[in-house]
Image (spheres, rainbow, N blue to C red):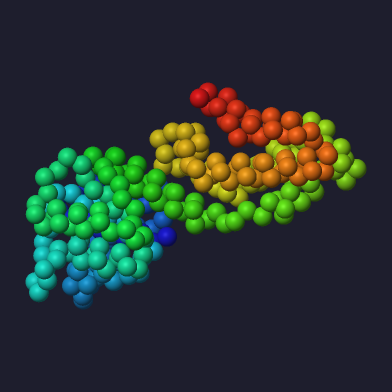
Amino acid sequence: MRIFISSLITGFEAQRTAARRAVTTLRHEPVMAEDFGAQLNSPQIACLQGLRASDAVVLVLGEHYGFVPPNSTLSATHQEYREARETKPVFAFIQEGISPSPEQAALIAEVQAWEGGLFRGSFVNADDLQDGVTRALHDVTLANATGPVDEQEMTARASAMLPAESQNQATPAMLELVMRRYRRAITETAGFYNTVGFNDDTRAFLSIPARHDLARRIDCGFLAELVAQHSLEDWEAADLAQDLAYNLAKKAYRL
């Protein structure tokens, strides 16, 4: 995705660099005024054009409102926010522990009051901002990549991994083998390995509800099919589901 980074430039260099790192860490493309180079258009027109060509906006607000261009009552950042909020996702990050000017306080209040398509977070310093932007973009990327689960189709694919003569004889060893292969395929498809940018990847894996819920539904749907086919006792399926959803992860990561 192309991610437009909207904020003050002067005095906010560290924060903009942090936002850029977050975007590039997840292999998205940052769109920033610093990269536009010489243009015939005014800087603000160039920024608005860059914003319109982007897929999402990261808005970073501190205590200063910024320069108000001639023939306008809004700062450049304020104009960019107004332009973006109706047409694309906006990820707004507001600095904590600041004393904003009246104009900036009004902008922050406007951002906090908006309820349509806006993610709001806070940050203390540049490192904190980088972590927050990484998490927000990672979660929205995952949500957009994860489609509805067709449990019957997945069950058929899992069953096909067993030898033909053994498909009705789900011994513990064979069940473990097919579940291991099946989980590996699903894990790769759902993007569970893509936790770059988190300080603690294992806890990030366990803390993302969408991923954990997807894994539980896949496992339990497959185990339910085995029970319905009388290939597995219901109590065995319940124990295995508990292990797959919670116990094995806790044991593996020593939680």
**Front residue (pair 67, 32):** 67
Pick out the residue farthest to the right: 165
Q: Quadrant of the N terminus?
A: bottom left
Q: For the point 25% across and 53% down, which residue is it?
A: 112
Asked if residue 99 is positioned above or below residue 40 in the image, the reply reads above
Residue 183 % position (x, y): 66, 41
Q: For the point 30% across and 47% down, which residue is it?
A: 121
Q: For the point 39% across and 45% down, which residue is it?
A: 135
Relative to residue 127, is residue 175 drawn left or right? right
Can residue 19 be seen here?
A: no
Residue 215 % position (x, y): 60, 42
Relative to residue 143, is residue 135 drawn left or right? left
Residue 161 % position (x, y): 78, 45
Q: For the point 49% across and 51% down, which residue is it?
A: 142
Residue 97 % position (x, y): 17, 40
| Number of disc labels | 0
Pick out the residue farthest to the bottom: 40
**Front residue (pair 231, 171):** 231
Can residue 164 be seen here?
A: yes
Asked if residue 21 is positioned above or below residue 247 in the image, the reply reads below
